[in-house]
Image (tube, coloured by chain):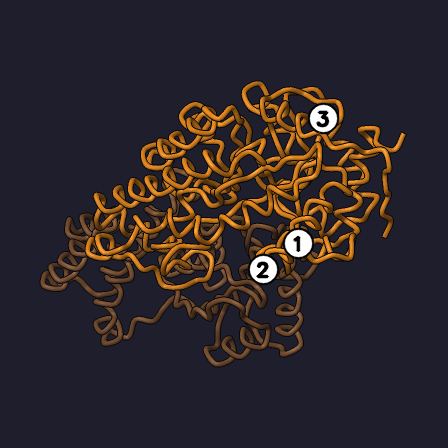
């Protein structure tokens, strides 16, 4: 496993801000949605995830320092981090933990303490948001913010299948869930932007709206119940002079023009080859928004270092110059991605953009 | 075809459980054979939904509510079918492979297969090769259907195929899920890869005929 260290790399977050605003940058920024602990440990010998959310604030700061340093060492201008709403949902877990949904009826909905969630969010995360900001290295900033989009948080309270049944059984309750949770998101984002967003140069949440062949809800429902709530957040983000990046997996082509126009996003991340190669997204939408992504995560798992190198170079040459491009995996670097595969991708990008000259 | 069965099929496509049940009772009262009610009222409705889903003309929620109506109908009809000696068209043992906890895709495939009149035994998520094979033996299954969402758990599919062959059982192994491809299917010698739930149900039925 070869780790090429580059002594001359100086991070500059303004590069990726240009990309989010759909401007091509010659030193193409590296970008990942999430990088798991195994890869970090194998490359730097550190385990920031074990420390970042420690009750001991000194330990927490050390964790965040390690976290930033990983991204800096690997040649990123930014670190990605979201503080997730699903992490503080009372009786949540229907999405992430396969628990039974806690809202099934109007009565469940009326009883649910939605109004407590914004306070809970900041009670849980404020110290860590502060530590994250205080340990940011010179030249770097973050991408992220308040994690989990509206669809994911609603699913975490109801469950996907029960949400589909609710659409048929009680359409008013189905609609009210999105509105009420949309209010919660707006309140959290408002305070986040006012008090904690300085360290973030691009705001982002992840909300997987689709799967291999289509969207998980009808395109009409996405446009009616989800995108207007996204818009409340992107309007606030834009008022703070920051671009907004949407991470959303799945085949979104039928609804993506609406996502761009209704939700007013600046950039989008997530791609997998079974749906469309990254260059297809760039061809389709590169005139309107910045495109973040690149290598299908499956390629990083199963191909040789040389094959990954060829894939990366082919992809970079296809998308070069077509609007704002930030490059990395099409999804994330979970622990099952071999570190060698991840490094092959990063090193190829860094050589291509001239870090090693 | 009886207008009652046509209406039943239409209500099923809309996921109207109450209407479907009322029409099943009406059909029974009219003296229509339970097997005819199943095939021309329930399965025909689900088949329309499946075809539309394959063509991306309906979304997952519409499939789920139609499948729920069909399940309610078949549950109501079951005693009459048993009495008449009607058997399912085949038996499928389905699950998400070991190490993978995703179940939405698997559940949709299950419902689509039930919509073809197959008896589907759902082993849930995180299912080992041994569990698939044991269930297939116990139920004399025609098919073992393996779902996976994660690249990292694709290897488990090979373990299932290898164990099925080692044990010499007759069940065909069908595979599917986001990272799975025909190339992968060929490489592990599984019997079938299908790219979507509706096609999986069609192929499963063809294996049972």
Q: Can residue A243 be seen in this view?
A: yes
Rounded to the nearest angstrom, the CA distance separating label 3 from label 1 is 38 Å
Q: Residue A54, labelled with which disc? A: 2
Which of these two is toward me, B12 or A8?
Answer: A8
State the quadrant of the C terminus of chain B. Answer: bottom left
Residue situated in front as seen by the camera: A67 or A313: A67
Residue visible at 35% across and 49% down in the picture: B63
Which quadrant holds residue A25? top right
Q: In this view, does B151 lie above or below A232?
A: below
> Who comes first in sequence, dot 2 or dot 1?
2
Q: Tell me which corner region of the image, top left, top right, bottom left or bottom right, holds residue A5.
A: top right
Closer to us: A167 or A191: A191
Whole-percent x and y of residue A255?
A: 43, 31
Which residue ends up furthest to the right in the rendered image?
A: A357
Mark 3 vs mark 1: which is more N-terminal?
1
Residue A168, position in %: x, y?
25, 48
Q: Mark 2 lies on which chain?
A: A
Q: Is circle 3 on the same chain as circle 1?
A: yes
Residue under mark 3: which chain is it in? A
Query: In the rendered image of this protein, which colour is used for chain B?
Result: brown
Labels 3, 2: front one: 2
Query: Which label number is shown at residue A318?
Result: 3
Whole-angstrom CA distance, mark 3 to mark 2, is: 44 Å
Q: Closer to the observer: label 3 or label 1?
A: 1
Work out how far the residue at label 2 is from the one at label 1, CA to CA, in angstroms: 9 Å
Q: Of the numbered discs in the image, which one, if any, rests on residue A147?
A: none
> Residue A63: which disc?
1
Residue lying at 27% horizontally and 55% vertically, measured from the top left: A112
């Amino acid at each position: 496993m070869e780790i090429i260290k580059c002594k001359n790399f100086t991070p500059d977050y303004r590069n990726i801000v240009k990309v989010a605003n759909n401007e091509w940058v010659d030193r193409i920024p590296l970008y990942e949605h999430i990088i798991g602990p195994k890869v970090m440990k194998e490359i730097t010998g550190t385990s920031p995830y074990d420390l970042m959310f420690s009750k001991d604030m000194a330990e927490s700061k050390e964790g965040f320092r390690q976290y930033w340093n990983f991204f800096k060492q690997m040649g990123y201008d930014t670190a990605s981090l979201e503080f997730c709403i699903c992490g503080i949902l009372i009786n949540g877990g229907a999405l992430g933990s396969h628990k039974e949904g806690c809202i099934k009826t109007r009565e469940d909905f009326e009883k649910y303490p939605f109004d407590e969630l914004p306070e809970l969010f900041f009670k849980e995360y404020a110290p860590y948001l502060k530590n994250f900001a205080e340990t940011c290295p010179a030249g770097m900033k973050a991408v992220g913010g308040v994690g989990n989009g509206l669809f994911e948080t609603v699913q975490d309270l109801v469950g996907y299948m029960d949400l589909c049944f609710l659409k048929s059984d009680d359409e008013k309750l189905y609609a009210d869930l999105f509105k009420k949770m949309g209010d919660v998101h707006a309140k959290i984002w408002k305070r986040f932007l006012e008090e904690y967003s300085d360290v973030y140069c691009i705001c982002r949440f992840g909300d997987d709206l689709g799967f291999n062949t289509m969207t998980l809800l009808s395109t009409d429902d996405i446009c009616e119940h989800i995108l207007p709530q996204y818009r409340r957040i992107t309007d606030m983000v834009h008022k703070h002079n920051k671009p907004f990046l949407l991470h959303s997996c799945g085949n979104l082509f039928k609804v993506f023009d609406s996502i761009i126009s209704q939700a007013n996003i600046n950039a989008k991340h997530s791609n997998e080859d079974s749906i469309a190669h990254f260059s297809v997204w760039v061809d389709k939408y590169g005139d309107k928004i910045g495109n973040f992504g690149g290598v299908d995560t499956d390629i990083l798992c199963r191909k040789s270092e040389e094959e990954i190198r060829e894939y990366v170079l082919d992809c970079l040459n296809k998308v070069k110059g077509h609007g704002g491009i930030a490059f990395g995996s099409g999804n994330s670097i979970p622990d099952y991605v071999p570190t060698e595969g991840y490094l092959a991708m990063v090193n190829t990008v860094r050589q291509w953009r001239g870090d090693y000259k | 075809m009886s207008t009652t069965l046509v209406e039943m099929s239409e209500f099923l496509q809309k996921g109207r459980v109450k209407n479907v049940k009322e029409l099943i009772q009406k059909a029974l009262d009219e003296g229509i054979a339970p097997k005819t009610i199943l095939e021309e009222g329930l399965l025909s409705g689900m088949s329309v939904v499946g075809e539309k889903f394959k063509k991306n003309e309906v979304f997952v929620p519409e499939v789920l509510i139609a499948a729920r109506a069909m399940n309610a109908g078949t549950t109501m009809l079951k005693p009459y079918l048993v009495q008449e000696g009607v058997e399912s068209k085949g038996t499928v043992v389905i699950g998400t492979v070991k190490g993978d906890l995703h179940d939405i895709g698997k559940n949709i495939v299950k419902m689509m297969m039930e919509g073809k009149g197959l008896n589907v035994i759902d082993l849930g998520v995180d299912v080992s090769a041994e569990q698939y094979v044991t269930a297939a033996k116990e139920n004399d299954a025609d098919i073992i259907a393996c779902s996976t969402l994660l690249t990292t758990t694709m290897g488990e599919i090979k373990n299932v195929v290898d164990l099925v062959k080692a044990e010499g059982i007759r069940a065909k192994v069908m595979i599917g899920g986001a990272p799975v491809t025909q190339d992968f299917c060929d490489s592990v010698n599984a019997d079938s890869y299908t790219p979507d739930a509706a096609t999986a149900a069609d192929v499963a039925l063809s294996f049972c005929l």
